[in-house]
Amino acid sequence: MSTSKSGSAQSRTSSLGSAGSRSSTTPPSSAGKTNSGRARKTATASGSGAKQALPPKPSDRLNPKTVDPFANSSKGQSAFASVYANGGVPCRLIHGSVKHKLAWDTPPEQVPFDPVLVTLAEGLKETVHPYTFVSCMGFRELLDTPQASQKATPMLPKLAPPLRAALGHTDSSVFERGMDGLLQLSAVVGPALNPYLKTFLMALSKRIMEKKFKEKVTESLQILEQNGGKDALPIIKSKVPTYCSVSG
């Protein structure tokens, strides 16, 4: 009787041991390490993914890109920024409570268009404050001075390349500043701008295909036609065949 009980107990122990060996091939300690390592990797991956997927802050849309005052001023500086920092543009930015303005060291009507107006035209490609404001406002204020037409017309060969570069820029805000600068120059020099229209129309013809700029580019072409006179229309039509004349 005792012999059969002992045999059955041994068989149960043997079956439990074999079942345990079949169900677990990894020691408990190593399994714990493996699971914790996987958990750490998963947490790290999810953490890095969360950093990449952070939405933009509302302030990013409200505040323009600004030059870092603590950064190395000479490293990676654009040509316009370098000239402006060295006093090559005789004006400075005045921060107002409502809007900014320029204070000229020399009255604008006495500022030489060569090279200051050209430098300001090159600054239209800037994408950070205060260079964006200084170049745009400075260009406008010089063209608003008396006798600007007589001063700007001889400068057209030098003004055309930077304006064309601004119009062809991938940044939408740079393109808009370039277009505004072109219209300001057109209003001042009139038909004298016609020989250079083709260089500007290539960029305008591309942007007119975008819904965002279609209306504004069309209005700009109409202004160029009005300022350029009857000779401007065939030039515009040659590059923008779909354009409809403002005069019908």
Image: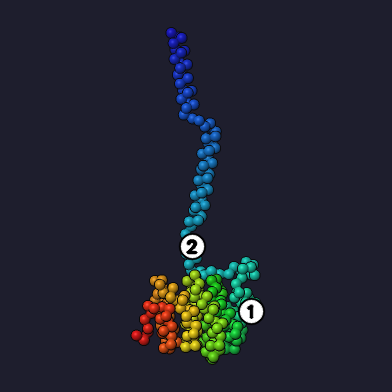
Relative depth, front residue between 247 and 120: 247
Tell me the residue that label 2 is attached to: 57
What is the distance, in whole Å, between disc 1 and disc 2 at their CAs?
Answer: 35 Å
Q: Amino acid at mark 1?
A: Gly
Relative depth, front residue between 86 and 176: 176
Q: Secondary structure at mark 1?
A: loop
Within the image, what quadrant is residue 103 found in?
A: bottom right
Tell me the residue that label 1 is attached to: 87
Q: Position of residue 28 (x, y in %)?
A: 52, 32
Q: Position of residue 157 (x, y in %)?
A: 55, 83
Circle 1/circle 2 CB separation < 8 Å? no
Relative height, residue 70 to residue 123 (above, below): above
Horizontally, residue 227 falls left or right of residue 87, namely left
Q: Position of residue 173 (x, y in %)?
A: 48, 72
Residue in the image at 51% along x and 47% along y: 43
Q: Position of residue 215 (x, y in %)?
A: 39, 76
- The answer to whether residue 30 is visible is yes
Residue in the image at 60% along x and 86% along y: 112
Q: Earlier in the sequence, mark 1 or mark 2?
A: 2
Relative height, residue 180 to residue 49 (above, below): below
